[in-house]
Image (spheres, rainbow, N blue to C red):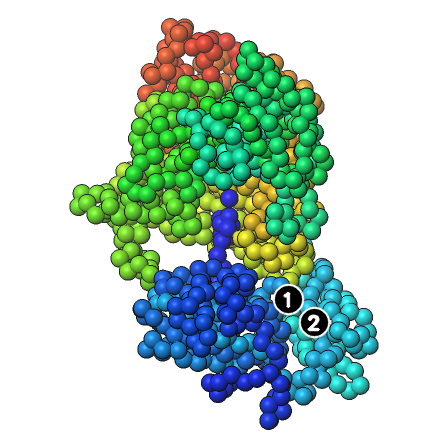
Amino acid sequence: MQGGRFTMKKRLGTFAMAMLLLAPMNSYAIADGTSADGVVYGSNLVPNGTFESGAISWPNWVNIQIGKEQPHGQEYALKIPAGFGITGLDFGAVEPNRTYRFGAWYKFVNGDPGANLKLTLGKSFSQQLDFTNSDGEYHYVETVFTAPPELFPSSNSNLLLVKWSNADFYLDDVVLEKVSTDDDLKKEAISPSFLHSTDNAETTVDLEWEEPQGNPDVTYTVYKDDAAVGETSDESFTVDGLQSGGSYNFKVVASKDGQQSFATNSLNVHTSTPLPAAPSHIYPGQIGVGLEGIGGRGFEFADAAKTLRQWVKADGSEGVQVDANGWPLEDAATVFFDHRPVAAWLNDIDDPFKKFPDISGVYKLQFKGQAVLGNMDPSSPFTVENQKYDAPTNTTTADIVLPKGSGLLFMTFKQTNGGVSDVKLMRPGYSLDGKETFTKEFLEALQPFGTLRFMDWLSTNNNNPAYPAKTEWSDRKLTTDATQLIQDGTHGVAWEYVIELANRTGKDIWINIPVAASDDYVNSLAKLLKEKLDPSIDIYVEYSNEVWNDLFSQQAYNKAAAIAEGGQEDSVLRLHTMQSYFDDPNDADYTPAKRSWTRHRVAKRLIEIGRQFQTVFGEDALNTRVRPVLSWFAIIPDQYEDMLNWVSKVYGDPKQYFYAIGSAPYFNSSAASDAASVTEVLTAMQEDSKRFSSPDGSKMSLIRLADQYGLKSFTYEGGPDSGGGSTINVENRIAAHRSEQMGDLVTYDVGNNFLDKNGDMFMYFTLTSGYNRYGMWGATEDIFANLETPKYEALTSLLGTDAQPFQDVEENHFAYEAVKALYAADVLEAGESFHPNRALKGSELKEMLNRLAAYAKSRSASAFAGYAAPDPGSPSVSREQLAVLLVQAYEAGTGRTVKHPEAMVLKDAKQLSEGTLDDAQSAVAAGLMSAEDGNFNPKQSVSRAEAAVALARLLEYVR
């Protein structure tokens, strides 16, 4: 769940580097206190800077060791082992505009030190240090710097020593101390700190700061772009008279008795701009939703045990013995669920409001065997009531009572005499003998959306063996497994549950084929879907997920496979390689040609998968019921064009193989400052959506590219992104995602900036999630209590969930969604009555087809034309007459033809008029019309409701 998730779900930033004032100093340590020249040196700010405690106690340290291998002076020194990759040593916070001295003893052993050690301060500062001596002896390095003015507490103000070199690096006797003059100390005594914006609007900014400790009686001067704009004795100030959409820099200086302070951190603020009016029309069927990984805030299964975590020993250690299905053969424990907010287990919750769903109540437990039940985590209590054992069936039942405020259920099963199996834990309100697989709340939340994407359900990311191994059909998750979460190497929910959910809801499905899936896996999956899936449900097929993204192991698999295949002289990947992309400095062998092989292999593999599905479903199912989507990296449209151009040269017209291209144009808040107010976070997100949706932006480029090749333009993921894993300003990011304005931004991004610009389907990421440092992806964070969130309501409003163009076609009518779609495309005009059961007149069909053609022309240069007009004087239209007209329009509008209509056997074929059999078979094969029990009923008059369903299907193809 791109464009800015870049995310990814999810994504890495780069340092914005700024030079600092540096002054050389003598290479020996100076004691705390006042020097001969009146300079005052503060105490060492680095805890355990000599490492003599022998313990790693500093925060955010990874890939380091403290030991006795290479000490300087005393016993211990710090070691960063050799190997490329960034290791950041966090030396703690410094203050803006202050001067500091950093000194340390260092040496390199076993390798090239390079020139890649530097001090950094967030995005504000990056300074290379002279760690270049590589003679294997300790050397002293020292520098003095003035911290930049942009620093914020608890965000970008921690001094890091960043190492990126291929040698063992040793460090000892580290000193970081403030360097002050007498005048500096006077300034320090009255200096305010932590200037930040609490809110801003189009023309005003509200500022706050912290008073100097022990000196509250000062006067503050507020500066805008280095010009004074006001004075106050309070610790807050409102600056007005600003321009909408402007960028301003603020700082505050205190004064007392003629003495001025240091300035606070400087603060850059962007004033907001008004959003354009929301689209006036609706987009039925054009917004789908991605499903969060199972066991999260979706609460998908009525049986909570379907997402229990892998069993461990009763003392919490690993290595419990299990049977073939994953049930423990000895005393054991499991976490049934943990829905506490991140990171409650560290007593450091991201969300200041500590929100999480109320899942309290009485759970019904049942399992085979006997056990004494207990709680592995007393901080999350529960009680066991009414426990009973039935000897004839070897079955235990019990009520598990979870109190309010509890989100964790971690249970032990002891004194089992051989373990337990077939564990069920029905949620409150569901009985042990009930037939419900899915919770009613989950099903209700899905109702507005036409398509469900199962990428996270299927554990698509980081779920593959190393190349050249394959994922086989025998590796898949089964419904009989002890859990649908990861277990002994099996990932992803059982395909049978995907099918059951689709059949239960009637939603189209978007599935992700494992990157290493063998041909047998693909064929077996296609056969299962053909056999079990409701034939009215369409299948969008994507090859893995974000195969371009090197954060996921599927990227490495595809890269290795592409290089292996491209290394063969007769490989099609070697044809028409693209040469315009740079070499990788960390992998000189990964040339631009090989880079193009990785892209081309994704297209090639998707073509192969589509052909395999085609063999199972029938040749004419491809791009009708089975719809391959070619997805790649949203911000580089040129690479999509390269892939499509390559397909056209090697295989032929891409629209014969692909239904759509997919991208992930998230809009994010990465441009907001580390102390941005809620409004500033929202403003940054608004600008990001606007940037990607400009005429030259990647979003519009991909819509045009899809139209050029006769394909649909989809997002495979999209929506607001404020994740990344950082806790910096997380409280304001969370608040922004809960605000009413976020709903307006979702409307703006999905509606104004995609669907209203001829995008075809937007897959929102995701239906549900918690809100924390890793993202606030969910349209809702509480599926039980709140489907009225700003995000969720924005999506349902765009879908026209509550729209009813005609009073006589209500929500439960079979043609309701079709009529709504035609109304949204101006094929129908709203009115009091639609008369759904009345026979369709020839004149009515002619008008609807003409209006549909006009709509298609308004969206695409390749709009259909040349279909035969129906007889406007006909009082009714037969099914065979409608079939002829629909197939003509379908072929003209899509450029595709039904190649083997004879494969669609109609029992009443002899009743069809001469010359109409192929059209009737083609209409059924393309999904434009149906044949109930194999009968087409060619002479039967078509009702207006039946015609609406058929025309809505045609609309979907030619939109």
The residue located at (40%, 36%) in the rendering is 489
Would residue 537 be found to the left or right of residue 668 on screen? left
Which is nearer the eye, 131 or 540?
131
The residue located at (21%, 48%) in the rendering is 567
Q: Which mark is residue 630?
A: none
Give above or below for 361 relative to 267: above
The reply to whether callout 2 and callout 1 are in contact (CB within 8 Å) is: yes
The residue located at (48%, 85%) in the rendering is 28
Position of residue 845 measured from the top left corner of the image (x, y, whole percent): 53, 21
Residue labelled with disc 1: 153
Position of residue 396 measured from the top left corner of the image (x, y, whole percent): 59, 19
Would residue 367 be found to the left or right of residue 200 on screen? left
Residue 121 showing in the rendered view: no
Q: Furthest-left residue in view?
A: 569
Amino acid type at image mark 2: Ser
Give above or below for 370 relative to 646: above
Give above or below for 768 relative to 624: below
Amino acid type at image mark 1: Pro
